[in-house]
Amino acid sequence: MRNKIALVGGRIHTPLGLAEALLIEGGRITEAGSSVSRRAEGAEIIDLKGRTVLPGFSDSHMHLMNWMESQELLALKPCRTIDDVKAVLGSRIAENPLLEGEWYRGQGWDQAFMGRMPNRNDLDGLSPFNPVLLTRFCGHVAVVNSAAIEALGLTSDTSIDGGVIELGEDGEPSGILSGAAVRYVYESIPYLENQDMSRLLEKYGPQAASFGLTELNSDDMGMFGYDFRRSIDFYKSAKKEGNLPFRVRQQFSLPSRELLLDFLSEGWQTGDGTPFFQIGPLKLVCGYADTPVELGAAVHEQDELNELIFIAHSAGMQVAVHAIGDEALEMCLDAFETAQLASPGIVRHQIVQTQIADDGQLNRMKKLGIGAVIQPNFAPYHDTAGPKYRWKAWNPWKTMLRKGITLSAGSGAPNEDLRPLYGLHAAVTRQNLDHEPNGGWLPEEKLTVAEALSLYTWSGAWFGGNEKRRGEIVAGRDADLVVLNEDPFLTKPSELWKIGIAMTICGGCVTYRSDDIGH
């Protein structure tokens, strides 16, 4: 049974202004005001001592299972040279030697710091017999060693639809893979068993809750072998077993007509599910912009993309398409427009990232009613975005809001840090944690604190069709809340990421409590 909880002595942000107290009962907010009524009798009274209460944070796009697994992989994000990458890999091999044929895996490198992409020659001397997979921070590019190339059966003649296998000067695979070729590698590695995933969720789920998160929109179908039935059963069981400290809204990556039709044949619709596990959108990957010569590498041909989006749209299913590059965005908009003309209807479709978009494309998004899930933590990495002539269109967040495009925000974790306050900092400053670049990248596109917080609260609820249930602190709404040690509205923008989380409450249950808040 959920506890009755009264929060008093705080700065509680509601649509009507600041309140000092609120009462939680039966998993819902029952009242908020200057004090709590007699209904609070028998409640646990928590003195906030001036702390701030906001709606719980929603991450609109991430990869939960991948993020949890990544906590145990090689951490390559701090690497600034290829020698750094080799040192991290070498240390793991020395400390934890694997059986021949088992995979060493890591994530987070960025060639922008290293001067070039790592390749198989950099890895072969360290691991001649065990395959190695090291994924770039974006998740869409990776490097493998010769043992992996052999295990995967990759040759100069191998072709993977929507993927790139780069060839070296010798005409053989260099070890650098992108797009669907990276997914091909993941599909070739044995999937985790449910018991392994349960262990990860039990170990790292509380850590996600400690970041103030109460809802995660997660694309982790690859971890389930693209078996949607297994995914649904796993999360429902996790809640019954008490291992789900947040709500999960599953983004179903079903990248083929057959997979999508199989899913729809079961009668599933966006919004179905339970209070803690909800059917989200069809998730597709269209393309990305990642090198100075790319406008966005297409994963699907236009006709295929048109068909997948039309099938989902005509069935009333929400669609979220990952598109970074402007050419990929154009393909998405064409597909959405084709679907809406053939089957008119209002569905809250999304473009994930939307990092490069010109004014005409943004006008089309508004006209078509397409929203955007932005990833603020990516913004400081503008130097990997592409040709300088397109940087003026890099992450045009303020412009999108002014045009009336609905935005929400996600981390893309494990590709970037899962903590929403890090994303809040990036959205408001357009800088990394070292205050670079000076003044922020394209400072005219900075968001206000209120705008940025809305991306992680109300907008996340709206895209899930839950705006009347959560996303604001109002009587009758779900008690999904985060208690902060400082008020973001009173904090220097450069210090936003340092704000401490004192408590997280999801569905009326305390899922995280710091040691310094009353018990």
Image (spheres, grey):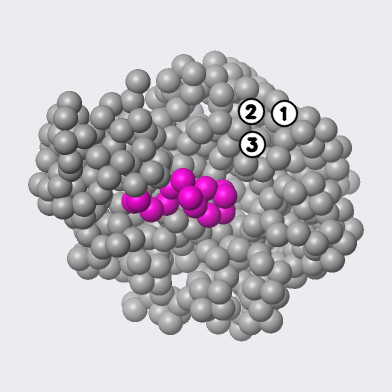
Residue 370 appears in the rendering: yes
Residue 485 appears in the rendering: no
Q: Work out whether mark 3 precedes mark 1 in sequence or the reverse, and give the earlier one.
A: 1
Residue type marked 3:
Asp
Contact, CB < 8 Å: mark 3 with mark 1?
A: no
- Give the answer, above or below, for where 517 lies relative to 202: below
The quarter of the displayed image where residue 406 is located: bottom right
332 sits left or right of 446 in the view: right
Q: Residue at x 79, y 67 (%)?
A: 337
Q: Work out whether mark 2 precedes mark 3 in sequence or the reverse, and give the earlier one.
A: 2
Residue type marked 1:
Asp
Name the one closer to the observer, 340 or 356.
340
Cα distance in 3D space between marks 2 and 3: 14 Å
Residue 388: where, in percent of width, then height?
58, 80
Q: Is residue 468 magenta?
A: yes
Cα distance in 3D space between marks 3 and 1: 17 Å
Range shown magenta: 461-474
Quadrant placement of the N terminus: top left
Q: How many marks?
A: 3
Q: Which residue is mark 3?
A: 272
Q: Which residue is mark 2?
A: 231
Q: Which residue is mark 1?
A: 227
383 sits left or right of 37 in the view: right
Q: Is residue 127 magenta?
A: no
Name the one closer to the observer, 505 or 224.
505
Nearer to us: label 3 or label 1: 3
Q: Residue at x 75, y 41 (%)?
A: 254
Q: Residues within 10 Å of mark 1 (few under 14, many from 20)?
A: some
